[in-house]
Image: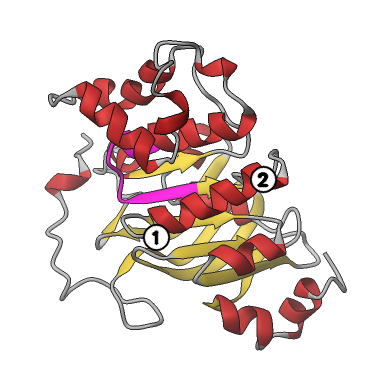
Amino acid sequence: MTIALDRLVRRDPTTASTNGDGGVSAIETRGLDVYYGSFLAVRGVDLKIARRKITAMIGPSGCGKSTVLRCFNRMNDLIPSARIEGEVLFQGENIYAPYVDSVEVRRRIGMVFQKANPFPKSIYDNVAWGARINGFKGEMDGLVERSLRSAALWDEVKDKLHQSALGLSGGQQQRLCIARAIAVEPEIILMDEPASALDPIATLRIEDLMQELAKDYTIIVVTHNMQQAARVSDFTAFFSVDEQRTGHMVEFGPTDQIFTNPSDQRTEDYITGRFG
């Protein structure tokens, strides 16, 4: 039997883990290993994510950034060969415990993907969809407006809410996907290369939005864009790969420190473009 996370969590900050700056962690991993079949894709990740901050995950292709990101809301469950060892703790509970409801995990920890993926529905129905399937009983028009405002999209779409979301530009579609994630009232928003397919102007709008959202949500973003990580994040985790192509976290800390005074030569080599 699975149990919704709400029934397990007592939300006592005195028993919660703390992040590196002494605050309460939003989510953390302990000894996280990820396998695809017999292949060890990521090993030994110990990471504490600060609440209501932006944490960037950087590193070369194949180093396990997106794999770790997907562990935070059990998206890897959808890959038949994937399995994890270790723990992912959200408010003190291991979200991989057999009694935890993975659907509830994904409601509390939302995700925005690399490629905007609006449903072939109206703008309104895209935002309302998650709330409806989660049994939202409130005033839907208000929820849709609040979510679109939070995603900095309301003024652009308020007069065409019942038109197809597929008619929006790429940047607008991505902000719509963010509004859709916000509508179910998550506590954490995961973003996997959210601006990689966008032009520079749309990218800056997404970055501005991320910084605005961090006032209310914990943001974890995977990015290959060093400038983006330096601009928007409070903390940065650098991942690399070993000779067996297994990913691992090399270094984690405040973004200013990682980019100006990293403690590991591999981090400096990657940031300065010597490898990766």
- Residue 83 x, y percent position in the rendering: 51, 46
**Amino acid type shown at disc 2:** Ile
Note whether 164 is above or below 251 in the view shown. above
**Picture residue at 41% right of the left edge, 55% below the top:** 212
- Residue 29 x, y percent position in the rendering: 43, 64
CB contact under 8 Å: marks 2 and 1: no
- Residue 264 x, y percent position in the rendering: 69, 85
Please tell me in which quadrant of the rendered image residue 263 appears: bottom right
Note whether 228 is above or below 112 in the view shown. below
**Amino acid type shown at disc 1:** Glu
Between residue 94 and residue 129, name the one nearer to us: 129
Please tell me in which quadrant of the rendered image residue 243 appears: bottom right
Q: CA distance from mark 2 to mark 1?
A: 39 Å
Q: Is residue 251 toward the left or the right of residue 241 in the image? A: left
- Residue furthest to the right in view is 274
Q: Is residue 7 magenta?
A: no
Quadrant assignment for the N terminus: top left
For label 2, the crowd category at 10 Å Cα-Cα, with few meaning under 14, some 14 to 19 and many 20 or more, is few
Secondary element at tag 1: strand
- Residue 232 x, y percent position in the rendering: 55, 63
Name the mark on residue 234. none
Name the mark on residue 87. 1
Disc 2 target residue: 201
- Nearer to us of marks 2 and 1 is 2
For label 1, the crowd category at 10 Å Cα-Cα, with few meaning under 14, some 14 to 19 and many 20 or more, is many
Secondary element at tag 2: helix
Quadrant assignment for the C terminus: bottom right
Camera sees residue 154: yes
**Residues in magenta?**
181-190
